[in-house]
Image (cartoon, helix red, strand yellow):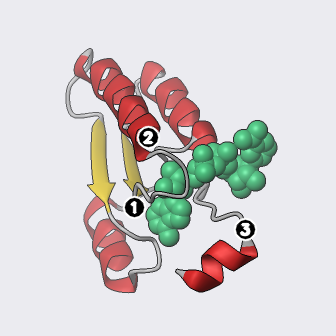
């Protein structure tokens, strides 16, 4: 959710008053400072209303982490916008 599409969806959702939990591993496929900048924008937006935003820095391939998040947060809607483009890069990692 620190990506281009995910971060924009989070910002839109927060502005509706929804509680949002975002998971991202902030990988280095492109400059992670851009992702950190987006996380900062989300933080600033979330501060305008309390208890609406939780960021989990982690990998969606980590089954235990995902199970923990689901058990604790019991989301009613799940959107997966994590993506890794580039077959060579993916295999090398
Ligand atoms: N960018 C566009 O114009 C566009 C248009 C239409 C559809 N889409 C689709 O939207 C989706 C997101 O695209 P984007 O442009 O936001 O990509 P992006 O690379 O900007 O964002 C993807 C995010 O997923 C995170 N990520 C990758 N693997 C992860 C993992 N295993 N665990 C946790 N986080 C992980 C990355 O760190 C990154 O922040 C893709 O499916 C893409 O095809 C994008």
Q: Nearer the viewer, residue 23 or 4?
A: 4
Separation (CA) of disc 1 from disc 2: 10 Å
Where residue 35 sits in the image (x, y, percent)? 44, 40
The residue tagged 3 is: 86
Say the numbered circle drawn on residue 35. Answer: 2
Q: Residue at x 25, y 65 (%)?
A: 72
Separation (CA) of disc 2 from disc 3: 19 Å
Disc 1 under 8 Å from ligand 1? The reply is yes
Q: Nearer the viewer, residue 87 or 13?
A: 87
Q: Earlier in the sequence, mark 1 or mark 2?
A: 1
Residue 69 seen in this snapshot = yes
In the picture, measured across the screen, residue 66 lies left or right of residue 8, that is: left
Where residue 38 sits in the image (x, y, percent)? 43, 31
Disc 2 under 8 Å from ligand 1? The reply is yes
Residue 77 seen in this snapshot = no
Element under disc 3: loop
Say the numbered circle drawn on residue 25. Answer: 1
Separation (CA) of disc 1 from disc 3: 17 Å
In the rendered view, tell whether residue 57 sits above or below residue 49: below
């Amino acid at each position: 959710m620190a990506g281009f599409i995910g971060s924009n969806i989070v910002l839109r959702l927060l502005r509706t008053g929804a509680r949002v939990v975002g998971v991202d591993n902030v990988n280095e496929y492109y400059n992670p400072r851009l992702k950190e900048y987006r996380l900062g924008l989300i933080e600033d937006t979330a501060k305008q209303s309390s208890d609406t935003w939780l960021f989990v820095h982690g990998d969606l391939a980590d089954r235990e982490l995902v199970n923990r998040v689901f058990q604790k947060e019991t989301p009613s809607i799940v959107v997966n916008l994590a993506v890794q483009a580039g077959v060579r890069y993916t295999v090398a990692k």
